[in-house]
Image (tube, rainbow, N blue to C red):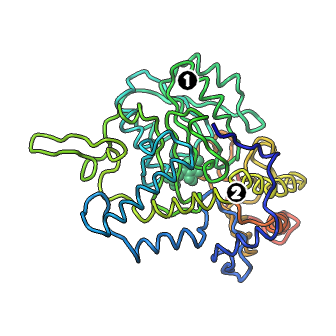
């Protein structure tokens, strides 16, 4: 079994590596509408793509594209080979036991919906409980609400502590007390950056016979993942947050789970045989990939996974953390600014914050004028924002191509915005406040 190095044992990217790396992302050298050089700090929403990913997809379209699994001609065989090779790359990226456990979907949202509509419909009944956390993205809440509407089960939410982490004792107790059928939680919160102890929580669930689904949307791009070690039943992530294309995501499921589940979408590709009387479902993974799959996108995703691996996920995590630490600790020193998230020892490269009496959208707009792309709003986490008694927050999220200089620029820009909007400044936020 391979061992994953801890962050403290790995060296972050050095300046010349970072310069070479940034050269591979042509978009990073552009300016924003105001003419300021771009600092792209909206990576938790979506990341940029390196040339190798763009080239892999372009090569596919220019050299060998055809539909997969169907044609008996050269192009179709080459496409099929590249598509299935991509599955192997992704299986290796997360250390899956077999590529049969890797299902390509259109994104993390689609992966969760697939589980809800198949395993969920098959296994949940009236009165059953799904346990999740209050920090989930809507993608890991709404499919369960929909499942409740179909079956009469209910969703229970684990609360946050004041320090934006979860109390392990409460988690363990809720698992024992509620005996949920499913424990579905995020590996990293897309707002707070809070890292959950996936291995420990899954282990507790396993001891109680509870099925687990881990939303790794904010983890897979940023840290090494090993589904064998984590022992998750289901784990999902999307391609576009890990330097890959849009329109592709991954559902990893343990083979015994995927085997026992009914197919989701019906159509071409997911059958062995169809007659006027019915159909026979294909084996894994085709069973869950009805219709023409995202072929060039899978190839692009594999290129992205190889690219991240080559740099080293542990080093990427260390680099982002170093930058986020500058932003996080700097913001905490400024009066009138609240960092919405735990201290750096419990979080990833995400730094959410609010400025007293300034609306998040005003902050983001002003930062854009200064060249910084950040996200403002509820970030698809309305229950979390209600829990925090906030209507919106501003989020800076760092990735492998960001520079230390950008973290400092961010801090200076935030102070500039604060000055502009505070009562002594020239302007007040016209938007309603929390
Ligand atoms: C934690 C989390 N889960 C799920 C999603 C949805 O991912 P996708 O766009 O791949 O469907 C996101 C995207 O913002 C996310 O941050």
Task: Quarter of the image for the N terminus: give it.
Answer: top right
Residue 95 image offset from top left, x and y in percent: 56, 43
Query: Which residue is labeled 2 in the image?
Result: 395
In this rendering, position of residue 223 left or right of residue 264: right
In this rendering, position of residue 369 left or right of residue 294: right
Residue 21 image offset from top left, x and y in percent: 70, 69
Residue 168 image offset from top left, x and y in percent: 70, 26
Q: Residue furthest left?
A: 276
Seen from the viewer's position, the closer of residues 68 and 195 is 68
In this rendering, position of residue 319 left or right of residue 376: right
Seen from the viewer's position, the closer of residues 275 and 155 is 275
Figure check: 364 above or below 86: below
Query: Which residue is labeled 1 in the image?
Result: 206
Residue 78 image offset from top left, x and y in percent: 36, 65
Give the label on residue 433, or none. none
Instruction: Say which quarter of the image contains residue 167.
Output: top right
Instruction: Say which quarter of the image contains residue 356.
Output: bottom right
User: Is the residue marked 2 within 8 Å of ligand 1, measured from its CB?
Assistant: no
Figure check: 434 above or below 166: below
Q: Which numbered disc, 2 or 1, marks the residue that appears first in the sequence?
A: 1
Figure check: 105 above or below 24: above
Separation of marks 2 and 1 at Cα, in angstroms: 34 Å
Residue at image point 24% right, 51% down? 267
Q: Is residue 381 visible?
A: no
């Amino acid at each position: 079994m391979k061992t994953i190095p801890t962050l403290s044992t790995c060296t972050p990217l050095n300046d010349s590596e970072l310069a070479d790396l940034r050269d591979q992302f042509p978009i990073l050298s552009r300016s924003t509408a105001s003419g300021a050089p771009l600092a792209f700090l909206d990576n938790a929403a979506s990341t940029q793509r390196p040339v190798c990913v763009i080239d892999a997809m372009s090569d596919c379209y220019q050299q060998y594209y055809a539909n997969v699994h169907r044609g008996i001609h050269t192009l179709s065989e080459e496409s099929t080979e590249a598509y299935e090779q991509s599955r192997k790359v992704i299986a290796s990226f997360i250390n899956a036991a077999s590529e049969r456990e890797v299902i390509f979907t259109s994104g993390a949202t689609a992966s969760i919906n697939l589980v809800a509509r198949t395993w969920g419909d098959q296994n949940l009944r009236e009165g059953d409980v799904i346990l999740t956390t209050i920090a989930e993205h809507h993608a890991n809440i709404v499919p369960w609400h929909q499942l409740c509407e179909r079956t009469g089960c209910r969703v229970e939410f684990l609360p946050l502590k004041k320090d934006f982490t979860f109390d392990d004792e409460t988690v363990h107790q809720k698992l024992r007390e509620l005996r949920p059928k499913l424990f579905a939680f995020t590996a990293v919160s897309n707002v707070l950056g809070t890292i959950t102890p996936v291995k420990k929580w899954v282990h507790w669930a396993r001891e109680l016979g509870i099925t687990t689904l881990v939303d790794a949307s904010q983890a897979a791009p940023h840290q090494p993942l090993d589904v064998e070690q984590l022992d998750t039943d289901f784990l999902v992530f999307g391609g576009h947050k890990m330097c890959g294309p849009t329109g592709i995501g991954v559902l990893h499921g343990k083979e015994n789970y995927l085997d026992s589940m009914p197919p989701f979408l019906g159509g071409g590709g997911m059958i062995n045989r169809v007659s006027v009387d019915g159909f026979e479902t294909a084996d894994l993974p085709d069973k869950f990939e009805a219709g023409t799959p995202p072929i060039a996108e899978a190839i692009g995703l594999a290129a992205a996974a190889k690219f991240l691996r080559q740099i080293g996920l542990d080093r990427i995590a260390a680099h982002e953390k170093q930058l986020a630490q500058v932003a996080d600790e700097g913001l905490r020193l400024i009066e009138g600014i609240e960092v919405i998230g735990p201290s750096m020892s419990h979080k990833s490269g995400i730094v959410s914050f609010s400025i007293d009496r300034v609306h998040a959208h005003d902050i983001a707009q002003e930062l854009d004028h200064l060249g910084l792309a950040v996200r403002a709003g509820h970030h698809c986490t309305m229950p979390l924002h209600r829990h925090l008694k906030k209507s919106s927050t501003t989020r800076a999220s760092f990735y492998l191509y960001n520079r230390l200089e950008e973290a400092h620029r961010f801090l200076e820009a935030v102070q500039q915005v604060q000055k502009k909007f505070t009562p002594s400044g020239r302007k007040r936020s016209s938007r309603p406040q929390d």
